[in-house]
Amino acid sequence: MNFDAFFKISYGLYIVSSKNNDNKFTGHISNTVFQTTAEPPTLAICTNKQNLTCDYIAQSKVFTIAILNQDVDMKFIGLFGFKSGKDIDKFSQVKYKVGKTGAPVVIDNTIAYFECEVINTVDVGTHMMFVAKIVESEMLQDGEPLTYANYRMIKKGLSPKTAPTYIDKSKLKSKEQNEEKKMAKYVCTVCGYVYDPAIGDPDSGIKAGTAFEDIPDDWVCPTCGVGKDSFEKQ
Ligand code: FE
């Protein structure tokens, strides 16, 4: 089997959120959302059983799907993608509203959303597949939806051209390019984020051209939030 073939499947990137029976909220990043029928409008999601969101959906039978704008930054994705709702209250850190179903809808970076009620559940081993009836949908802002391919570029530190953090390396001066060569990349041992000195971390005020050694000690991984000591030279 050639696993590269799996990366040729196209996906979007979404935040799937739910509530439990105590009305606590959580959500996580998901790339497996697809429409199943048009009449009535239904869709399906697939979520890992280890995700708290999976437990919450199984309890409440409701969830929401936020379609992310491709301009979203890695910190935001990191909050929902690399941290567990078992450890932190993700909804204390974002703008959201409570929808018709009582489940939360993330507003930040969302171009459109759906509210859903589960009509069928399939146990597929490591994951649960939830098929749901769409009870509400709304457009929130203009923008292009984030794709999984785009996300993989952002994760590598290569922002899409439309993103505010994008830096055209060809425009860097030759002197700076020479300095770049001396500076090593560092990898986050927790999430795989790569700090590239040529790009820096502009969202956290780290300018392009800053060596890893020169980053302030209180800087944290923009993806998963761990400190500098969790990084290794690439
Ligand atoms: Fe990290």
Image (cartoon, rainbow, N blue to C red):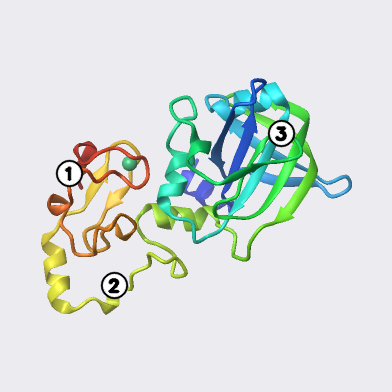
Q: Identify the residue at image location x=61%, y=37%.
A: 17
| Mark 3 nearby-residue class (10 Å; few <14, some 14–19, many ≥20) | some
Give the side of residue 56 with respect to residue 211, left or right.
right
Give the side of residue 172 with respect to residue 39, left or right.
left
Amino acid type of the residue that numbered disc 3 sits on in the rendered structure: Gly
Assign a secondary structure to mark 3.
loop
User: Label 2 belongs to which residue?
Assistant: 169
**Residue 123 visible in the snapshot:** no
Label 2 with label 1: CB-CB less than 8 Å:
no
204, above or below 171, in the image: above
Q: Identify the residue at image location x=50%, y=37%.
A: 92
* Foreground pick, 15 / 40: 15
| Mark 2 nearby-residue class (10 Å; few <14, some 14–19, many ≥20) | few
Amino acid type of the residue that numbered disc 1 sits on in the rendered structure: Asp
User: Which quadrant does ligand 1 occupy?
Assistant: top left
User: Label 1 belongs to which residue?
Assistant: 217
Q: CA distance from mark 1 to mark 3?
A: 41 Å
| Earlier sequence position, callout 1 versus callout 3 | 3
| Earlier sequence position, callout 3 versus callout 2 | 3
User: Label 3 belongs to which residue?
Assistant: 102
Amino acid type of the residue that numbered disc 2 sits on in the rendered structure: Lys
67, above or below 49, in the image: below
| Mark 1 nearby-residue class (10 Å; few <14, some 14–19, many ≥20) | few
